[in-house]
Amino acid sequence: MKKLMLALLLIALITRLYALDSRPIDHDESIHAYLSFRLLNNHEYRYDPAYHGPFIYFSTAGIFGVLGDSKFTARLVPVIFSLAGIFFAARMKKFYSYAPVFALIMVFSPSILYYSRYLRNDLIVLASFIAVIYSYFSYRLERNPAYIYLAVIFSAIMISSKENGYLYLGTLISFVVFRRIYERDFSLDVRALKHFIPAFLIGSIIFASLYSAGFSDMDGLKRATIDSFRHWFTMHGQKDHWKPIYYYARLIFQYEFLPLGMVLAGIPEFYERLKNRKVSEFELFAFYWLITAFLIYHVLSHKVPWLLVHLTAPMAFFGSIYARYLSRKEGAVVFAVLFAVTAGMAGYLAYVDSTNTNHDLIYIQAQPDIELLAERIKQFNGSVLVFVPGNDYWPLPWYLRHENVGFSSSYYGGYDAVVTSEGQVESVKEKGYILDGKYTLRPGHDLYWLHKAQGS
């Protein structure tokens, strides 16, 4: 088992780190990276629900402080947590034989691989929840209090990373409550409570110190709870990033057909075991996580491709429990073929065509042109204004974090060159500038380089 886990982790490490800095930093990535850079250098941070939880900023700032700030180091936090998720998935073997299959899907899933190499919070949240699940069932099995502390610490990281951490926490807590009600188990585990109280205090300190920026902004705790829920309920009402109800179904059929097939193959056995009252608590939880995840993410109007990882993991988890077909030649062959296609697609999206927004999984991505534009600005011998209404110029502030460049949603005179969007080109030309370059920020949104005409 140790050799298998080491092999999985080594493969995961290679697949996550290989060409990690080849793809341009994207819009959301650049905001996360830039705010982490500002946190490290200016000691500035204030929690805003629109930019999700503070953990990614403090952890990325810490990496910048040790290893320097770059595209590669900016993406290391999701890489690290992706490895942690795979580690805990493989450790589930103490509960069921085919846990390595769950870990294998975590390594090669197209959505999980792509967003393990992307500076977002989702892999932090997902991996932390897998650690919490592992800790909960390990405590149930072994009664080792160390698992209580592990579960609480990862829960604190989870809800300090992104707002859907509360959804994950609610999934586990509601399952425990329903189980106790069904079993009419209203007893109090005094031994667990004795350890849970100090563990809860540790988790609370992690949560409070992050959201309050080291207790310098105590109002951050209110924004982390009341304001956070209010913000995302408002976004749901406004249908921010709205997609039709079948959006994730389409993505699953396109990219995550292997874990879907595993779920469909496992449901008959689960049903038989449920009907005959042979189903374990572990199996019930796997089904509960699967169902609640599908309900939550299909109901929410905010539908984006990186959230697919939160559906892929419970599918792989549930499906791998009933992977006994792998012991039969026919089942193993079908799995191997589907796995090969899945792994090939994951590699193609991660390393070959990672900026092509025609892929639904990629959705939106800064194009290589943006790095050419950033380099031109760095090499330009003169002052530059990046002027785009709505401040729609990201990821340029990240790329130009070490440069003295003006960024504005309004035009200001006195600059030797101006970078702006298509709608402002003519008005800038009227002020004596010459158009001398077009750069695609992302499909459908170009930026234009204009410099002062001689003698103007």
Image: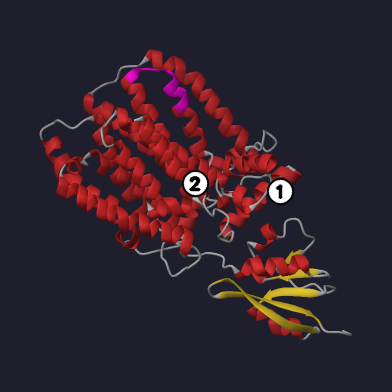
Q: Is residue 92 left or right of residue 421?
A: left
Amino acid type assigned to the residue bearing label 2 in the image: Phe
Q: Residue at x 65, y 51 (%)?
A: 70
* Magenta residue check for 91: no
Amino acid type assigned to the residue bearing label 1 in the image: Arg
Check whether the beta carbons of the residues at disc 2 and disc 1 lie within 8 A of each other: no
Q: Which mark is residue 229?
A: 2
Label 1, residues with CA under 10 Å away: few <14, some 14-19, many ≥20: some
Can residue 42 be seen at all in this image of the molecule?
yes
Q: In the depicted view, which residue is nearer to us: 171 or 354?
A: 354
Q: Residue at x 66, y 53 (%)?
A: 34
Kindly report the distance in space between the C-alpha atoms of the residues bearing marks 2 and 1: 26 Å
Which residue is under mark 1?
A: 38
Q: Residue at x 36, y 58 (%)?
A: 344
Give the quarter of the image for residue 406.
bottom right
Badge nearest the viewer, 2 or 1: 1
Q: In the depicted view, which residue is nearer to us: 386 or 116?
A: 116
Can residue 173 be seen at all in this image of the molecule?
no
Magenta range:
142-150
Give the quarter of the image for residue 95.
top left
Residue 362 point in image, percent of width and height: 46, 62
